[in-house]
Amino acid sequence: MEGDSVTLHTDVKTNQQEDIKWSFYDTRIAQITGDLSDICTDVQCNEGTERFRYRLKLDHQTGSLTVMNINTTDSGDYELKIISIRRSIEKTFSVTFHDVPATEQDEMKRKSVKEGESVTLDPGLMKNPNDLMTWYFNDIYIAEINEELRKICTDVQCKERFRDRLKLDHQTGSLIITNTRTTDSGLYKLQIISSRFSIIKSFSVTVSDSSLSSGVVAGISCC
């Protein structure tokens, strides 16, 4: 969806002997040499070209490319070339981005959360059994789910904050926060990684003090 981030995975781990080049409609947008002597993205690769306006992130270990804060004009074919002494690999990623439907935005914004209530953060996607889904709260890891594993709060800070108030829906990957507190307010991110792509969904959550009037209750908006 527009505004999300997506990662295009090379499925390799560089041994510092490959040249990795990314192109978008035949325009070079990212490059990394095996010895890390030449690394560039967007305007660094092509002076005067700022199509992505510093929204690209290059993984130096794998060469994977992340496009952040995506928009519909980013739709198209992304070409990857990996060149080494022994082999040459070419891959094409056909990527399509969509606007978030206004009806969906309105529905999310109208949800009100008061202290003590439960709230479900639903990614609204059909979960593939092989997908790895990881939840973060203000960039702190809080939960993870895949075909064989459900893990919640391995971090001490996470355990102290939520104290067994988090639940995961194994079928959908949804995160349920029970007995909510005002300190649960913040940014929740869900990263979904499959064999072909990576998606990040963000939820801005505000939990109001139950002693306040309903007129000041905020809701949940899906970014």
Image (spheres, rainbow, N blue to C red):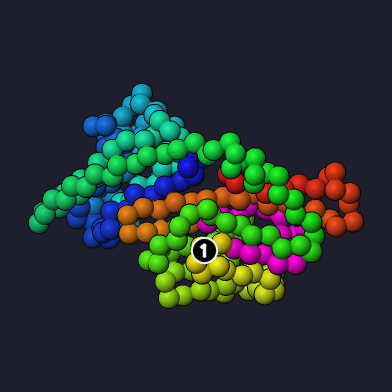
Question: Which residue is at the front of the view, 59 or 160?
Answer: 160
Measured as percent of width and height from the top left, residue 181 is found at 77, 62
Q: Along the horizontal axis of the image, is 48 left or right of 69?
A: left
Q: Which residues are magenta?
A: 175-190
The residue drawn where x is 44% and y is 51% is 199
- The single residue placed furthest to the top in the displayed view is 48
Question: Which residue is at the front of the view, 127 or 22?
Answer: 127
The residue drawn where x is 36% and y is 35% is 75
From the image, which quarter does the C terminus lie in?
top right
The residue drawn where x is 75% and y is 67% is 179
Measured as percent of width and height from the top left, residue 79 is found at 25, 41
Q: Is residue 38 visible?
A: no
Residue under label 1, please give it: 173
Q: Along the horizontal axis of the image, is 55 left or right of 79?
A: right
- The amino acid beneath tag 1 is Gly
Q: Along the horizontal axis of the image, is 60 left or right of 142?
A: left
Q: Along the horizontal axis of the image, is 187 left or right of 20?
A: right
Q: Quadrant of residue 96?
A: top left
Q: Is residue 147 visible?
A: yes
* SS type, badge 1: loop
Question: Which residue is at the front of the view, 161 or 62?
Answer: 161
